[in-house]
Image (cartoon, rainbow, N blue to C red):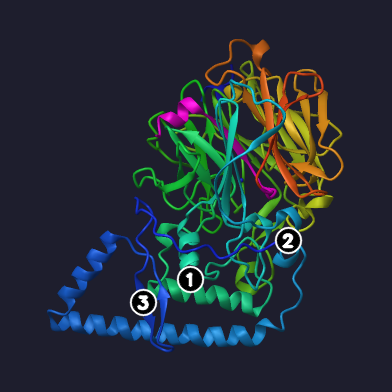
Amino acid sequence: MNSFSNSMQTHPKPIQKTCYTTFRGIPHLGARLPSRRQETWVPVLISSQEKTTIQGDHADSTGSSLGKIALSNSLFLSSHISRFQNCLSTTISKFIDHQPPLHPSVDPCQVFTGNFAPVDELEPTNCTVVEGELPGCLNGVYIRNGSNPQHMPNGPLHFFEGDGMLHSLTLSGGQATHCSRYVKTYKYMLEKEAGFPIFPNILSGFYSLPDVLANVKVAGRVLCGQINLMRGFGLANTSLAFFSNKLLALCESDLPYVIGMTQEGDIETVGRWDFDRKLFASMTAHPKVDKDTKEAFAFHCNPTCFPYVTYFYFNEDGVKQREVPLLSINQPTPIHDFAITKRFAIFPETQLVVEPTNVMLGRGMPVVFEQKKVPRIGILPRYAESDSNTRWFPVPGFNAMHVTNAWENGDDEVVLVAPNVLSIANVFHKIEKVHFSLEKLTINTRTGKVSRKVLSKRSLELGSMNPYYIGKKNRYAYLGIAEKVPKMSGLAKIDLEKECEVSRRLYGPGCFGGEPLFVPRNANAVKSDEDEDDGFVVSYVHDENSGQSNFTVMDAKSPNLDIVAKVKLPRRVPYGFHSLFVSQDSLSNNW
């Protein structure tokens, strides 16, 4: 044993205004600040505690000369910022009709079409099983996250930056109930009250003077107190996780939002979880949960300040442990996903880097491809207290944005399975031209040698596996056959031991699904390794010919991934990102 081993169709109709119960993390609606220039009211979100504090401070201020001066100066500053904002609005309006055409990948009129177009919220609705029958053991909720813009901006909007909407299917006793709800993030609530987009779409990029000026305008709103960045500005649109008895909606630009499921099958946003104020700003959308220890492992990226990546974990009670800044990452890099084993945490660093000046100067996206950068894999002890024992292994040409699994072979070898994004330079603007090559890497931590094996010639992404094998050696993985990620024409089952494809299913002409999710037949445990693939693979599938969406259940163990059941959904479900199945036993603890 060596010393090392020891040591990321149509626009929605306006939603009727509704009074929502106030909960921790989401403020009261309705507090407003006047714009002195136009005598109009701008909506602001503040909590009741903040309101009391503000009122108390105001009372103190008016009771003394110094207080009156301070209040006068504050109003004077607010007045001038408001006038500056109005000037910006006028300038932006003059330029908006003369902008250069947007690239199709960030033009919302071209991105959000067909089954990528957003839909309205949908209250719990009973569904019909149109083929086969739902397995009696499949009791719980299947829920998938995705991008669903509440408002369409005049400027750029990439598909990755729409507001998060959850599409659930509650299964019980062979019956199914479908529901679609927005995650009620701070951003969503603020823009819903305003009736138009407020926050800039940073990842989508800035391409002209109006884009840059719009960002400056937002900065003015922050200075005026109209936007409180401490409440976050994320979308909660990427993935889901369940740990510490909480269902979470996640996006790497913000903290997680706790989601509740009612017995009627409705989806409720409980609030933004800051882990008792021990986590600031953001967290990865792909935390790893060890089913044996009940611990969850995560990290957050800071694209502008060093350290750029910080690693941490939570114990089984959800208490955040010590942070470990990865000081050996010396340039801002957008790491989206990572892996754990029983002893290590593994970080794939790609050729993508962050260039903040692109945003400030209107040169496009902040994330760019760096030709000369060599991708590498970082491995550090799972319970590391510092970055000192992290080792990096260069792997030229290996750019992994998602990780399927990782495990250890003895004392000296670490195995990593992940789709390699070939021509990663096109991943944001021409994703239909990107090939995702599933690879198995074996890293010898003693010699530094890295061997690679391509497991399929197909373009495979957005995969899953039996969750009880996270961080442990597993045999099977299920990945979507990429058409235009996240639009999948079918799925393939890969045998990681034989290193080949063993079965596949295509959805048929004009039919496309999303991430194929493996759900164990026994939701509580796996009896033996022979039972690893004893379960089902599920996904929403959309027929572009008829416009109909269904929920498809396939037998994961069968040679052809046979269809067990199809549930007709009450309307189409747009293509989206990651999904999760939570058993009824786990849900009942939240009711």
Residue visible at 60% across and 83% down in the picture: 92
Query: Front-most of 171 and 279?
Result: 171
State the image coordinates of residue 134 (x, y, percent, origin top left). Answer: 65, 26
Q: Earlier in the sequence, mark 3 or mark 1?
A: 3
State the image coordinates of residue 423 (x, y, percent, origin top left). Answer: 81, 49
> What residue is disc 3 on?
33
State the image coordinates of residue 115 (x, y, percent, origin top left). Answer: 73, 53
User: In the rendered image, is residue 71 in sight?
Assistant: yes
The reply to whether the C-beta atoms of the residues labelled 1 and 2 are less than 8 Å apart is no
Q: Quadrant of residue 321?
A: top left
Residue 48 vertical position relative to residue 198 in the rendered view, above or below: above
User: In the rendered image, is residue 514 in sight?
Assistant: no
Residue 229 lies in the magenta-colored region: no
Q: CA distance from mark 1 to mark 2?
A: 24 Å
Q: Earlier in the sequence, mark 2 or mark 3?
A: 3
Residue 590 lies in the magenta-colored region: yes
Left or right: where 89 falls relative to 246: right
> What residue is disc 1 on?
194
